[in-house]
Amino acid sequence: MAGKSDPTRILILGGGYVGMYTALRLQSKLGRREASVTVVDPQPHMTYQPFLPEAAAGNVEPRHVVAPLRRVLKRCHVLTARVTEVNHEKRSVTVEDAEGIASDLGYDVLVVALGSVSRLLPIPGLPEHGIGLKTVGEAIYLRNHVLAKMDAAANTTDPELRKRLLNFTFVGGGYAGTEALAELEDMARYATRYYESITRDDMSWSLIEAAGRIMPEVSEKMGVYTVKALEERDIKVYLNTFLKSVENGHAVLSDGTEFDTDTLVWNAGVKANPVLKNTDLPLDERGRVKATSHLRVEGHPDVWVAGDCSAVPDLSKAEEDPNATCAPSAQHAVRQANQLAKNLISSLRGRKTEAYFHRNAGSVAGLGLYKGVADVYGFKAKGFVAWFMHRTYHVSKMPTFNRKARIVIDWTLAFLFRREVVSMGQIQNPRSDFKRAASS
């Protein structure tokens, strides 16, 4: 424990939206003698996930959708390591670095911002053939993968293999899944102009959604519009349908549809980081940390929590459902981080804290170049206007002026010059040429 004259040791677990934005505010508002702030995350950067589909499609440079933690958090200690256990009774957190070396960290105040991971279902073949889109590495991989499959299809005369190579399947019709599909399809369609033997009609793009509608983040009317807009691009949308199996790349759907595919992108929801099970903090039935409306962990006044890993009461829905909790979205995470930092500072200085309250402002989504949907404060838009709103909103939320400027420059260059559609597949296996040279 820190002495009366020692700075309070604040330990932030996670460097995503909540972790980084909380640390940013703490470093700007707290003096060095008041507190020392340490941020722990397995990655040395924060990824702005709403831009991942554009990074995958080549509209922005992948490095520009991440914010380097050490550069942004100059007055914080940044530790690149993975949290493996939390023992709040002993005020100790066990972490493991990339080399597998474990160590224990002590703290006075803990901020849990461990986020979420993809929610996978026990579908045969999914672990072997699926990929998500939650990291910049996955975005880079998908871009190279799609273009590499087009290269392979252009080189084969086998019609069945060609059909399989050009079959791109996405599971999950939420914001992330729909936008990822739309951006990559837009990129691939543009790329066909450089292939003599591939046209847009040769490719098959599918979106599989278990619910009766896609894009629940927007109004039902805008969701219907999005389906029609995708279908006009010859994208197949399967509603009320789920993936039963994808063993050996052979997809079987619940409606009896079967096809072969080499590309399966999984965006069917998220779940709280499973490492939370290795803590002595109270969890709800979904594995999230139980929180008060002031973003404190229930029963633990020195532990704060926010973001996807937390069950924070949604006060905007309290009259309709007293048990409602905030949805796992970037919109909540960024705002919760701001309120959490304010409350933490107030707590350290003996002042009252405030409850977190935010009424959903709506959503914006890009569906490819100059295409989009938006439903913000009752204002509904589609096409170019919605696409422009999408870009404007997200660049405003991108942390640091440096990253904002780089993204705007990327967009400007993409507008002035043709889209880059080159595959750098060697990134997937960078040592293959070296091994081949060594064996010869």
Image: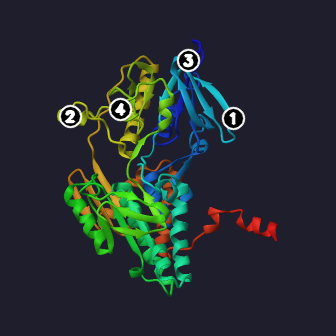
Q: Is residue 371 left or right of residue 160?
A: left
Q: Kindly state the secondary structure of the residue where label 2 is placed.
A: loop
- Label 4: which secondary element: loop
Whether residue 369 can be seen here: no
Label 2 – label 1 distance at C-alpha: 46 Å
| Count of numbered tags | 4
Badge 3: few (under 14), some or many (20 or more) residues near its Cα, within 10 Å? few
The CA span between labels 1 and 3 is 21 Å
Which tag is nearer the camera, tag 1 or tag 4? 4
- Rendered residue at 40%/62% (across/down): 170
- Which residue shows up at 80% across the image and 67% down it? 439
Q: Which residue is mark 4?
A: 285
Q: Are marks 1 and 4 in contact (CB under 8 Å)?
A: no
In front here: 83 or 390? 83
According to the picture, the residue beneath numbered tag 2 turns out to be 321
Q: Amino acid at mark 3?
A: Lys
Give the residue at x 24% y 60%.
223
Which residue is under mark 1?
A: 101
Counting residues from the N terminus, which is met first, the one under dot 1 or under dot 3?
Answer: 3
Which residue corresponds to mark 3?
90
